[in-house]
Image: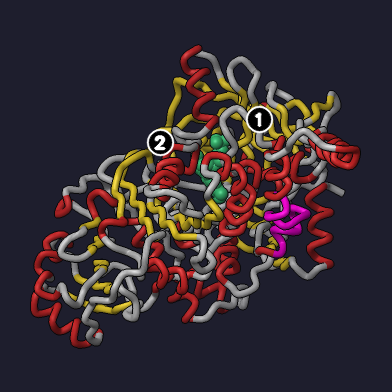
Amino acid sequence: MSTLQSLLEELKKRDWLKIIDEPLDVFLEIPHVAYVEAKLASPKVLLFTHPIDQKNGKVYEMPVLMNMFANFEITEWIFGNHPDAIANEIRTLLHMKPPEGFMGKMSMLSQLFDLKNVPPKRSKKRGECQSIIYEGANASLERLPILTTWSEDGGPFITMGQVYTQSLDGKMQNLGMYRLQKYDEHHLGLHWQIHKDSSCFFDQYREAGKKMPVSIAIGGHPLYIWCGQAPMPYGMFELMLYGFVRKQNAKIVKSITNDIYIPHDVDIVIEGFVDPSNLRIEGPFGDHTGYYTPQELYPVLEISAITTGKSPIYQATVVGKPPLEDKYMGWATERIFLPLLQTTAPDLIDYHMPENGVFHNLILAKLKTRFKGHAQQIMHAFWGVGQMSFVKHALFVEEDAPALTDYWALTEHILNRLSTSSILITSGIIDALDHSSYETLVGGKLGVDATGEIKPKTCEVVSDEVLYERASALIPNIIALKQYMTHTANPITVIQYTKTTSARTLFDALSPLKNHLRVVVFVDEHNNDVENPYMLVWRTVNNIDAQRDIWLHPFIGIDATTKNTLDGYTREWPKDVDCDPKVIEDLRKRSIIDISDEEIEKYQLY
Ligand SMILES: Cc1cc2nc3c(=O)[nH]c(=O)nc-3n(C[C@H](O)[C@H](O)[C@H](O)COP(=O)(O)O)c2cc1C
């Protein structure tokens, strides 16, 4: 039995697996079921045993596995330990001092012994993943039930591919999780963004004018894919993290047609070479920001072989509006990487990336302030270190603040300490997926230092109705207005309006109401609901570039609207990633999904 099959057996025993035997289409249907499952109160892992491609009259032999990281409990089980316990092991190693006394020596020896499990072990034998070998014309992607997740995607995409590469001199190996677009039977688009390690290797091959070997694995132990998305420093092979977490070296074997090593027990391997002179348009793709990422040029893999285990399982994920499977993968990453962050910011007590901040858009951090400007110091450390530098908005609180996951209490705490002088606006590099800034890859950053004293409450609070009337008299086209946290020093007023003018002109127009306003957030008419704070936070942190969209006078203003030429924005603003309502309705009618109208609205499925 393969690694993945035995894990599925265990999932079945624990009643954590839903098996769906009904034939379902790889085009939208399967991904929509997984998307809905992730929004339910107790999501499970999904196994689709009969994937079909209705349009082309195809029936696949391979089952499709989705939502492997279905919830906190299953994620912890995959790791074999709570991520905080793994973080503690790392912390112990980082703080390892020369041992004192016999017992000290013994315990250190055992820790060092454990480290023997870290480096991947190369095997000369063929792997289980090479039980069946297809080469040349037989190495066809048509064998795989590759999903098209969203109706406006540029085609089918492999969404849980472990992409294995090596540097030109062969000294460094890398595992990255990047999506892969199926162009045809033998070609895949490789969406490694410019900041990522494989892109760095790719530059080496391009400069040398040499073809780059790449192997993509699917399946095997789910920790492989988690390691692929982990923000390991450049030059460190992610499979070392696998060995560390599992206390068992990753066993790797050489690909059949190139020199790349892959884990022996994965389900599927796609091997090939990239000609660095050949780039091709990739996308669009409904991404984990909840927006479509635009088309861009990326390298292409020409497939030389596909190998599989005896009964391979095709693993996939769905990304889009939160919450989804990446919430749980991100949770483990957040916990396990805390001790490493603490090496550059020792007074950082904890940090947290809420799921509706889609990781890099919002970070909450707790620190023990020891000197003036301490929070700013850590903000700059974040913005300067590895993938943390993608973070757009960082909010800092003191050690006595509520838990970072207690969102209402924490918001109250921050708003009671917020003032214009605690706000830092700067710029830096941003995630390649970000759409808010005027140009790609660089944009605004916001840091809020809420570690200070409580501020006096000076806001004259009136009801939503009264404020709505007064605001409507000053600015046109208001659709709705709602105030949040009116008991704090800085209530938040969300104003939805039909956008015929840039929001920046409206802040000044509202200045006669400045006694009633402390923080104003403008949203537009498209898909916003002022009663839905979860999605408002999601959209706001996605849509703002702090340098362009935040004002500090006459009150704090945030323009979270869709930008266009009224704002001097000339890029194409992406569409929301929406489910196809017909597919959802049909799946509901067939009782394959069970989601209420309220939940559809809450998570803005369409
Ligand atoms: C579900 C999911 C999909 C992802 N897709 C991509 C992608 O298409 N391109 C990319 O550059 N990063 C993507 N990432 C993020 C990378 O996996 C992550 O940045 C990783 O640390 C990159 O590894 P590297 O630094 O070794 O390149 C994705 C992450 C997740 C969780």
Q: Residue at x 72, y 44 (%)?
A: 92
Which numbered disc flags the more N-terminal residue, 2 or 1? 1
Q: Main secondary structure of the magenta part?
A: helix
Q: Residue at x 21, y 81 (%)?
A: 460
**Res 281 label:** 2
**Does the magenta portion include 487?**
no
Q: Tell me the quarter of the picture where residue 291 sits.
A: bottom left
**Vertical relation: 296 (above or below) 368:** above
Q: Is residue 92 left or right of residue 370?
A: right
At numbered mark 2, what does the secondary structure look like: helix, strand or loop? strand
**Vertical relation: 180 (above or below) 291:** above
Q: Picture coordinates of residue 580 (x, y %)? A: 45, 66
What residue range appears in magenta? 73-86
Q: Residue at x 65, y 47 (%)?
A: 226
Q: Is residue 175 left or right of residue 297?
A: right
Q: Amino acid at mark 2?
A: Ile
Depth check, front residue: 302 or 506: 506
Which residue has dot 1 on it? Answer: 271
**Does the magenta portion include 83?**
yes
